Image (tube, rainbow, N blue to C red):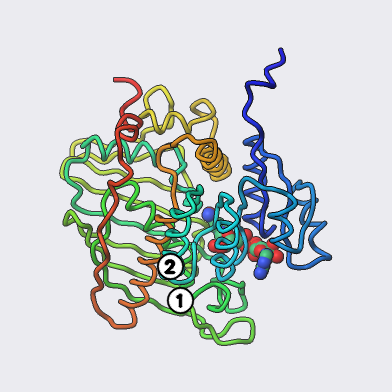
Amino acid sequence: VDDGDRRAPAVRAAFIGSGFMGRMHARAAAANGAELVAVLSRDPERADRAAAELGAARGRTSLEQLLAEDRPDVVHICSPNATHHDYARAVIEAGVNVVCEKPLATSPADAQDLADLADERDVVASVPFVYRFHPMVREARARIAAGELGRVIGLQGAYLQDWLLLPDDDDWRVDSRVGGPSRAFGDIGSHLVDLLEFVTGERIARLVATTATVHARRGGRSVDTEDVAAVLVELAGGAVGTIQVSQVFAGHKNDLVLDVAGELASLRFEQERPDTLLLGGRDASAVLSRDARVLAADAARLSTVPSGHPMGYADAFTGYVGDVYAAIRGERPEGLPTFRDGARAAEATAAVLRSAAGRSWTDLPTRGIDDDRDDATRHALHRAVG
Ligand SMILES: NC(=O)c1ccc[n+]([C@@H]2O[C@H](COP(=O)([O-])OP(=O)(O)OC[C@H]3O[C@@H](n4cnc5c(N)ncnc54)[C@H](O)[C@@H]3O)[C@@H](O)[C@H]2O)c1
C-alpha cells in the first residue's frame, strides 16, 4: 500500500558534537525516522569521520554553512557546556528548532537569555532531561498528581557516579572554562533537580549546600570545580529533604535515586532499575513492575515494549526525541523539558555554588511549575484503566 502521501515528511536533523551524546542523539533521531543531514565538527579532518560514525549525510566545519545548505528542521547540540550558548543562539536566530544538552548554559543569565530568545522566535527548544522519559517516572508523577501520596512531606535524592574517583581521572568537565563553574552539580545535579520538581510538581523554595573537591589537581592542573555536593532542600509546600551528588563514589555508576515521602505513602525510583517503582506503605510495601495495562496513560504511552522486556536509558532517549519531533510537527507532548526547565536547573546550580560559598541558605524562585499543566496535561495524567 502506498501511504507515502499521508506520512509526515522526515524531520531533517543535524548534530553538533559526535561524542557519547552525539551518538545517542543520532541513534534516537534515526529510530524516530529522521533524516540525518549533517554533523558539525571543529576539525576538518574529523568532520567526515564524525558523519560516518553518526550515519549523517555529511560533515561540516561551519555552522552557518550547515544551517544554510543542509536546511535542518532541528539541530541537536551535543558539544561541551561552554559552547552551548553561542551555538543555541545561532540556531534559534536562524529560526531553526533546537535540542541543547544540559547544562543549557554555564550561567543562569545565559540560560535565561536562550529561553527568552526561543520564546521570542517561537521555535521548539528542548533540553534532554531524559530521565523524565522512563515510564515509571511518569507513573510516579501521575500517582503524586492524583493524590495517592497525600501531601508531600519529605524527599531524598541522590545521583552518584565514580568515573572521576582516581586523581588521574580527567575530562573536559573538570575545567570550569569548558564545563562551567559547577561540575558535579551542573553535570548531574541538574538532572536530579529537574526530576525532583517534575515528579513532585513542586519547586525547591530554598536550599543550603556544601561542596567538596576531593582531588585538588587532575591532568597536571589545579581543579576549580567540585567533585561532591550535599544539599538540604525545602519545597514550596513545606517538605524538607536532601540531595547528594558525587562523581567520586566508588561502585556507583549512574546511581540516580529519588524517594518521595507523602502523608499516606512513599515512592522510590531507581534509574539503574527503571522498569520498577517501589511503593512504600506503613502496613505493606510493593514493587510495581512496568506494565502498560496498569500504568497511567502518560506512562503507558512511553512503555513501548511489553512488560518483562527490559527498557532502559536508550529507550528513554528514543522516547524523548520522539516527543521533540512530535512538538516540531505541532503536537503538544506531555512533559517535554523546555529551555525554561534548562534555565531552572541553571538557577538551582548557581544557588548551590552561592550557598556553599557563603555557607548560608539561599532562596529560589518558585514560579511556574503548573503553568504548563493545562487540561491536556490533566487528561494525560489520568489513569489508563480504572
Ligand atoms: N542528557 C544526558 O543524559 C547527558 C549525558 C551525558 C552528557 N550530556 C551532555 O552532553 C554534552 C556532551 O557530552 P558528551 O558526554 O557527549 O561529551 P564527549 O566528550 O563524549 O563529546 C563531546 C563532543 O563535542 C565535540 N566538541 C568539543 N568542542 C567542540 C566545539 N567547540 N564545537 C563543536 N564540537 C565540539 C567533541 O569533538 C566531541 O565530539 C555535554 O553538555 C554533557 O553535559 C548529557
The 10 Å Cα crowd at callout 1, few under 14, some 14 to 19, many 20 or more, is many
The 10 Å Cα crowd at callout 2, few under 14, some 14 to 19, many 20 or more, is many
Q: Nearer the viewer, residue 284 or 21?
A: 21
Per the image, label 2 sits on a secondary structure element best described as helix
* Quarter of the image that includes the N terminus: top right
Q: Nearer the viewer, residue 286 or 241?
A: 241
Residue that mark 1 sits on: 226
Residue that mark 2 sits on: 185
Q: Are marks 2 and 1 in contact (CB under 8 Å)?
A: yes
Taking the view exactly as shown, the residue that stands out farthest to the top is 1
Asked where in the image residue 344 lies, by quadrant, the reply is: bottom left
Asked where in the image residue 359 lies, by quadrant, the reply is: bottom left
* Residue type at numbered disc 2: Phe
- Give the side of residue 207 with respect to residue 263, left or right: right
Figure check: 308 above or below 209:
above
Figure check: 345 above or below 145:
below
Figure check: 257 above or below 178:
above
Quadrant for ligand 1 reads: bottom right
* Quarter of the image that includes the C terminus: top left
Determine whether the beta carbon of the residue marked 1 sits less than 8 angstroms from the nearest atom of ligand 1: no
- Give the side of residue 273 with respect to residue 27, left or right: left
Looking at the picture, how far across and down is residue 302, in whole percent?
48, 33
Residue at 38%, 38% in the rendered image: 138
Q: Nearer the viewer, residue 378 or 64?
A: 64
Residue at 27%, 60% in the rendered image: 204
Looking at the picture, how far across and down is residue 261, in whole percent?
23, 48
